[in-house]
Image: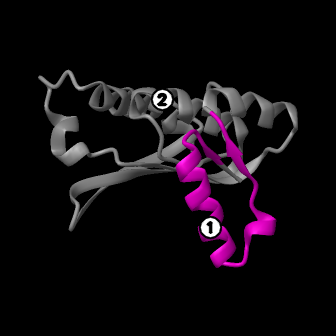
Amino acid sequence: MTLEADPHHADVARANLARANVASRVDVRLGPAFDTLPVLEAERRAPFDLVFIDADKRFSAAYFDWALRLARPGATIVADSVVRAGAVVDATSRDQSVLGVRALAERLAQEPRVVATALQTVGSKGRDGFILARVVDAAPGATRQNRK
């Protein structure tokens, strides 16, 4: 399943899925994620084993909360484009995308149900990176110190 807000990106996704011969196995949903995520929940499409977040960075923490809500223990959650060419560590930045990524990092630091790391990548597009989080089977209220 993929959620796409932009009709053009949805068309590109469908074309790529068809080229990979998996279009019949992937549901492409068009519309803003905050509209389609509650529908997925109501349809009981979860739990998911993998969630890839590459949406409006201003709302990264909220997308993570949805991902955690719809993921099973053991699932992987990936949040892309989180280094922002290094701007995420610039304490003076007021860029809303940077602030959104920082809010995600703060949210992850407080969430006992996941273990996570951020990785920087360097390539033709410059410096960026992703967060890789694993949902662990921990009771709400568990702390990082009492997890194995």
Badge 1: few (under 14), some or many (20 or more) residues near its Cα, within 10 Å?
few
Badge 2: few (under 14), some or many (20 or more) residues near its Cα, within 10 Å?
many
Establish if 122 lies above or below 84. below
What is the secondary structure assignment of the residue under circle 1? helix
Residue 41 position in % (x across, y down): 80, 33
Q: Is residue 13 magenta?
A: yes
Q: In this image, 110 relative to 74: left or right? A: left
Q: Is residue 52 visible?
A: no
Question: As shown in the figure, which amino acid type bears the numbered disc 1?
Answer: Ala
Residue 46 position in % (x across, y down): 79, 44
Between 140 and 28, the residue placed more toward the observer is: 28
Residue 36 position in % (x across, y down): 71, 33
Q: In this image, 42 relative to 49: left or right? A: right
Marks 2 and 1, how far apart in space? 30 Å
What is the secondary structure assignment of the residue under circle 2? helix
Quadrant of res 64? top right
Residue annotated with mark 1? 15
Residue 32 position in % (x across, y down): 61, 32
Q: Is residue 29 visible?
A: yes
Q: Is residue 23 magenta?
A: yes
Q: Which residues are magenta?
A: 3-31
Q: Which mark is residue 61?
A: 2
Residue at 76% in and 54% down: 27
Quadrant of res 108? top left
Residue at 25% in and 43% down: 84
Q: In this image, 57 relative to 112: left or right? A: left
Question: As shown in the figure, which amino acid type bears the numbered disc 2?
Answer: Ala
Residue at 83% in and 44% down: 45
Establish if 104 lies above or below 8. above
Establish if 42 lies above or below 11. above
